[in-house]
Image (spheres, helix red, strand yellow):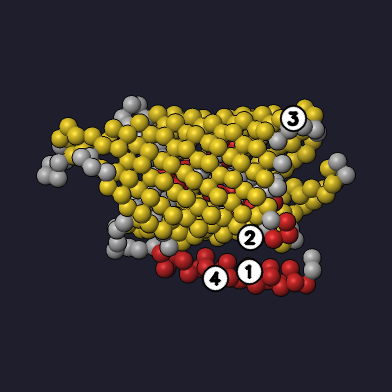
Amino acid sequence: MSITKQRLLCGVIPVLLLILAVSPVCFAQDDGYVNAEPHLRLGAGARSIGLGGAFTAIAEDATATVWNPAGLGSAADLSLNISTQQISDQGILGQSRHFIALTKTLGSYGAIGLAATNFSVDDIPRHTDADGVEDGARFSRSVNAYSLSYGIAVGHFNIGLTGRMLMDNFGVESVENQSGFGGVDIGLMGHALHIDVDENQTPTFHYGIVAKYLGASLGEGTVPMVVDVGVAYDLYMGNVVTFSADIEQEFVNLDESPFSMRAGVEYTILTNKSTEFALRAGVRASRDNQDLFGGFGVNIAGLQVDYAIQDGINAIQGVGITHYLSLSYGY
C-alpha cells in the first residue's frame, strides 16, 4: 500500500468511528414522532435475502447501494440488478417492492451506483378518527427511494457513501405527495486471510460495518439510524461454502427489540469457469420476531437469476410468505 493510501485510510477510519459515536445522540429523537419506514430495511436482491440478509460484509454487486456502499469498491466493471418482491400476509393487504440499480467503475477513482426502490401497499382500509372503526374507504400508498452511491478500494479496505431521497404518495379522494431526505449511509469493508485460488490471491475472510439513514426524515417523522456489523468466511474445497453473520442495532425507543441478528450459508457449485449454481439458507431473529429464508441462484457467464423465499413475521404487516426474484448481470 502506498504512503498516500495509508494516510487516506488512517484519516477515514477515525472519521467513521467518530460519526458512529455521535450519530445516536444526534439523530435518535425521543420526543419527536418516529417514522421508521421499515420498507427501507427489507434489503434488495434475492441472493442476499436467501442468506437471511447477512450481507454487510459481502455486498459487492449492485445491491451494495442498499446493503453497504463500500462494496462498490470491489464490484464488477458494470453491474446491474433488477429485483421484485411479493409479500403475502393472509390477504390483509397487497404489498410489493421493486428495486433496480446500476453501478459502474471509474478506474482507480472507485465506482458509482444509482438505485431506485418502490414500495407500494394497496387496499388499505381507512379508519375514523373517533373510534377507529373502518368507514369503508380504502386507499393506496407508494414510497419511492432514489439513491446515489460511491465506493472505492484502498488496499484491502473499501469505503463508501450513499445519499438518498424519499418520495411518498398516498391519499383517498386525492393523491397527496411529500418528499424528504432519506439520509446518508457510511460504510467500511475489509478483506483478509488470502489464499491461492487458480493462481490468484483470494481473500477468505470479510468484514463490514455501515451506519444507515443518518439525518433521514420524511414529513414530520424521522427515520432512525441503523448500524449493521457483519463478517463472512469463504471455505474453498473444490466448491465454495460461504458463512455470513450480521448484527443490527436500530437507534429508536420502541417496545419491540431494536437489536437483531442475521446468519446465512451459501453452497456454490462451480460446474465450470462460466457457470455456477448456489443453494442458500438463512435466519433472522430478534427478541420479538423470527424469520427463515431459503433460495437458489444460477449464474451463466455473468448473467445471474436468483430466487428466495421468506417464511415468518412479515417486516411490514403480519405473518406471511414473501417471494423474491432477481435478475443481475456483471462483467
Residue 275 is marked as 3
Residue 65 x %, y %: 56, 50
Residue 56 x %, y %: 59, 49
Q: Residue at x 63, y 69 (%)?
A: 12
Residue 41 x %, y %: 46, 47
Judged from this view, the residue extending furthest toward the left is: 130
The residue carrying mark 4 is 18
Indicate which label's residue lies in the foreground, 4 or 2.
Answer: 2
Q: Nearer the viewer, residue 222 or 107?
A: 107
Q: Say which label, 1 or 3, has the lower sequence index.
A: 1
Q: Residue at x 65, y 50 (%)?
A: 104
Q: Nearer the viewer, residue 147 or 210?
A: 147
Task: Give the amino acid type for the residue marked by disc 4 in the picture.
Answer: Leu
Say which element carries label 3.
strand
Task: Give the amino acid type for the residue marked by disc 3 in the picture.
Answer: Thr
Estimate the spatial distance between the alpha carbons at disc 3 and disc 4, rounded to whole Å: 43 Å
Q: Say which label, 3 or 4, has the lower sequence index.
A: 4
Q: Residue at x 65, y 33 (%)?
A: 304
The residue carrying mark 2 is 159
Q: Say which label, 4 or 2, has the lower sequence index.
A: 4
Say which element carries label 4.
helix
Q: Is 175 left, or right, of 201 in this rendering? A: left
Estimate the spatial distance between the alpha carbons at disc 2 and disc 3, rounded to whole Å: 30 Å
Classify mark 3: residues with Cα within 10 Å, few (<14), some (14-19) or many (20+). some
The residue carrying mark 1 is 12
